[in-house]
Amino acid sequence: MTKYIFITGGVVSSLGKGISGASIGKLLQLHGFKVNMIKFDPYINIDPGTMNPYQHGEIFVTIDGAESDLDLGTYERFLDIYMNKVNTNTAGDIYQTVINRERMGFYNGSTVQVIPHITDEIKKRFVALKDNCDISIIEIGGTVGDIEGLPFVESVRQFQLENKKDDVLSIHITLIPYIAGAQELKTKPTQHSVNKLREIGISPDMIICRTEHHIDNSLKEKISLFCNVKKNYVIEALDAPSIYYIPEFFYRQNVDLLVMNKLNIEPKKKFNKIWFKKIKLMSKFHKIIKVAVVGKYANLKDAYKSIDESLNLAAAELKIKVEVYYFESEDKNLIEKLKYCDCILVPGGFGYRGIAGKVKAITYAREKKIPFFGICLGMQCSVIEVSRNLANLEGANSTEFDKNTKYPVVKILDGQKSIKYKGGTMRLGNYRAEIKKNTLAYSLYKTNKINERHRHRYEMNPEFIDILEKVGFHVSAYHNGVLPEIVEIKNHPFFIGVQFHPEFNSRPMKAHPIFKGFINAAIKKQNNLI
Ligand code: GLN
């Protein structure tokens, strides 16, 4: 029998609902429960795939090819599970389903309305993981009070009414702001937010208070009294040095026991604190490696969330710390700035802006023998760079940036019967690749069969493989023997480009092999070993 935990947020956005939900999930997992999580985003886009990273941050790709919210990356990393299409929902997608059904005459002449038709569809999706897990944690995106969020919160109300009391738990996450002038933490915004929830018919069982300062007993009493929540169910969520500390912060406040108590469930196994210990060990290091990420959204770390996580997780396993510098590829002083870094990563992206700078950064990394890692567009830029500067194919380009280039070294391939395109013309989700022996890729993965997530339209053009191999640029992995998946330069300490997104497969204590190899090469470079 699956139990349900609903997470809503109040006062402001960006309170870390995903992290709080995943932290509770982690604790329940450590008690032996099979936990899964579902995200509901109230915007009208069918998925965030078309949104500007400035609006939305990173697009996380699930193994079955859904373009989703970056919270799904948090769920995967905390719980060490894989997300699928069922784990991500948007208002747009839900409305589209209902409208399509209406057009097919499904509703037998009735007026199609938010209640019950949209709310029924939402509730159907609440139970999408029914019987596949013991506890399903459902995060409602946005902030309580938003107009577009109303059908979702209404659906939670109905769901509570229709299910047994101890099968459903509601957690509200709010902000307790600190007013510096008065030197006081303020509970009023939380009171208003909970009032808003209660107006809609939901009385939260637990309130998690995001705060920069410790919440004392009297403040907890106040929140408890005004928000109608028992005092021990008022939880403090102080800003943490690492997000992975949060499960332990919650554990110390008995969040796991309180949740299990409300849901009327007993732990399935003896709780083991080893995960906490391992997490603590991850942040004890002092030696610093400086990583340059040369991208298009340098001001927005969230645009490269999984890359940032992957670098940090790889560093922790190598017992060092990374400082990640995000450089705008159009920065005039880019090369000057790169001189202060130990390694260079060019991430994925779309569109022409910034390509010249990325290619310049790759020339620098290649010539100066700086460890280089190109991801998706970064890999494609390495193909362009080497074609132009090593193979003398002047003006070589991707047809994404120059339709009429004489040397289309990256292009949309037609006639690739082996590829089943999804989501328009994109190659999305997991695809297998076979790695050749005696390559850098093989030495990192230590296997010849891999499965990695994709999100791109263009491919390295196989017609140019022979020319590029002659100048020392090799394809070390293929999909179905035809599509280049990994490229590398042999005569270089560490130069690798991948057509996929390995950053989605990093986990605490299970860093991704390429990220680990990349940081390891940077350590060697710093120690003048390469
Ligand atoms: N724009 C490139 C393509 O569509 C790369 C995409 C990416 O980096 N995710 O192929």
Image (cartoon, grey):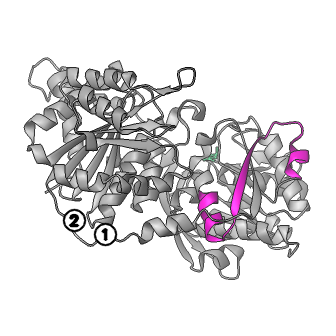
Which is nearer the eye, 132 or 277? 277
Residue type (three-letter) at the residue carrying disc 2:
Pro
- Quarter of the figure with the N terminus: bottom left
Which circle marks residue 271 in the picture? 1
Q: CA distance from mark 1 to mark 2?
A: 8 Å
Residue type (three-letter) at the residue carrying disc 1:
Phe
Q: Does the magenta segment cover residue 523?
A: no
The magenta-colored residue range is 310-339
Residue drawn 72% across the image and 53% down it = 323
Label 2 Cα neighbours within 10 Å, binned few <14 / some 14-19 / many ≥20: some
Residue drawn 32% across the image and 62% down it = 29
Contact between marks 1 and 2 (CB within 8 A): the answer is yes
Give the secondary structure at mark 2. loop
Give the secondary structure at mark 1. loop
Q: How many marks?
A: 2
430 vs 256, left or right, is right
User: Looking at the picture, how far across and down is residue 459, in whole percent?
Assistant: 64, 53
Which is nearer the eye, 2 or 21? 21
Which circle marks residue 267 in the picture? 2
For this orientation, the residue located farthest to the front is 218
Residue drawn 57% across the image and 25% down it = 180
